[in-house]
Amino acid sequence: MLTVEHISKRYGPVQALRDVSIDVRPHEVVGLIGENGAGKSTLMRILAGTVQPDQGVIRVNGTAVTLRDSRHAKACGIAMVFQEQSLLLNMTVAENLHLTQEGEFTRMGLLQKRRMNAAARAHLSRVGLDVDPRTQVGELTFAARQMVELAKALALEERTTAPLTIFLDEPTSVLETRDIGILFDRMRSLKSRASFIFVSHRLDEVLQISDRVYVMKDGAVVAERPADAVTVSELHEMMVGQELHAGYYREDRQGLPQEGEPALEARGLTVRGVFQGVDFALRRGEVLGVAGVIGSGREELMRTLFGFLPQTAGTLTVNGRDLVLRSPTEAVAAGIGYIPRERRLEGLVMDLSVAVNMTLANLDVAMSRNIIDRTRERAIAKDWIERLHIRTPNANQVCRNLSGGNQQKIVLARWMTAKSRILILDHPTRGLDVGAKGEVYDLIRALSEDGASIILTSDTLEETIGLCHTILVMRDGSITGRFDAPAGAKPSQVALLEQMV
């Protein structure tokens, strides 16, 4: 009913998808798994009509289609239930279910809410959700909102003659066990009228609900297996693939962390409803990795350590002082720097120059008589351009015109200019090609050798294992595993995955 044939997609130097082929048959659940960065999200965006592939064919019920946008994808029977949810919390359940379809309930220019609410009740009954359609979505539990999303997807039945395929993107990541059971029961009962593509990092759940499973790695499908003929351990191995050579991550330069008082220590660190009871000590010269799937709490932990998400319990000690970081300004004052995963949105001011971006976190270094000295600012930038081998015509070049790897170096240079000795690297090589990644790895090793303390979270386990001295594994907001990762005695990816999923 839905076929993807030889789909490829490239973003600049990054090959996000390469020759991907999958098919979905009537009345089945297809599992789709892979590490972060494997290409699952890009494939979903293509099938949702929001991204166009570079090559390949999509067929719906045997007919080739070009999905121009999300409205066209829905007309072809393809619906998405997103992990982050797409409901508007300040509107009612009925208004969300019929968003953009209000014309069906409009007469003489007036919206007939009674009819719309009655239709919403019928849609909700299909997924077994007993709520008043006049209720604002923001008043519902997350699990109930997930069922509203599913009802919204099933409502496509009335608007298309195409067979219905529903994508579920990490639908269980924040659900309790009871709610997961309810969701799976609904999916099984709905297989008579729709097929599902179930995307999840929880491999036991994938095998529990799926008929077949596709495994993706590095933008390609590397395996397809019947769910009843494969084990969780075998899926682990397929996701991991072949290990990269240790030299790729400069393991020969991985020294020992310094002894003495930790640079940063967390004891029982908690953000209510997000993560809880996090304990670790970060030594000087250490690279500490935090591994976990989306929804595990690792990204939120990173943002808490930089003051974006203030802690609600526990203790955070920085260079011997107990602190509660309520804002990034306080974190910077404590000597902490942050390299965000979205460098174009959070890391750089794209239309300002290299020099201005490098001094943003510590304007004092470029000040003269309370005024920014542009000559001094450019001299500082020129020094870092030479030291970090940043490819730019000059320090006045706007950051938007540089490659991703050079942009990332500018963000690192900013925190070195600010003399930050604790660095939080949130997916530091996301979107970089192999050469640019290697340059970032060199910088991480150089910073570690110089005594900087680094906390790292990455898109891939290979990178986390290769770069780090110590690795914490998070699942469902808690630390589930701790691994020493000295050079020459690294833990296996499978060992980490067993604690992650």
Image (cartoon, grey):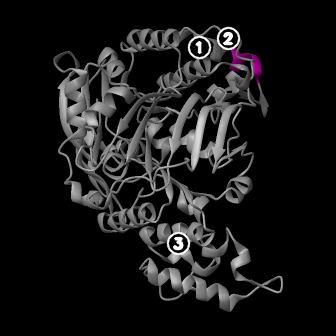
Provide residue 381's location: percent of width, then percent of height.
Answer: 57, 82
Distance from Cα at disc 1 to Cα at disc 2: 8 Å
Q: Is residue 162 magenta?
A: no
Q: Give residue 372's quadrant in the image.
A: bottom right
Tell me if 165 is positioned left or right of 151 in this view.
left
Q: Which residue is labeled 1 in the image?
A: 124
222 above or below 10?
Answer: above
Q: Which residues are the magenta region?
A: 112-117
The image quadrant where one finds the C terminus is top left
| Res. 12 visible in picture | yes
SS of the residue under disc 3:
helix
Q: Amino acid at mark 2?
A: Val
Provide residue 439's location: percent of width, then percent of height.
Answer: 36, 68
Q: Residue at x 83, y 86 (%)?
A: 369
Q: Which residue is labeled 3 in the image?
A: 410
Q: Nearer the viewer, residue 61 or 262?
A: 262
Q: Which residue is labeled 2 in the image?
A: 131
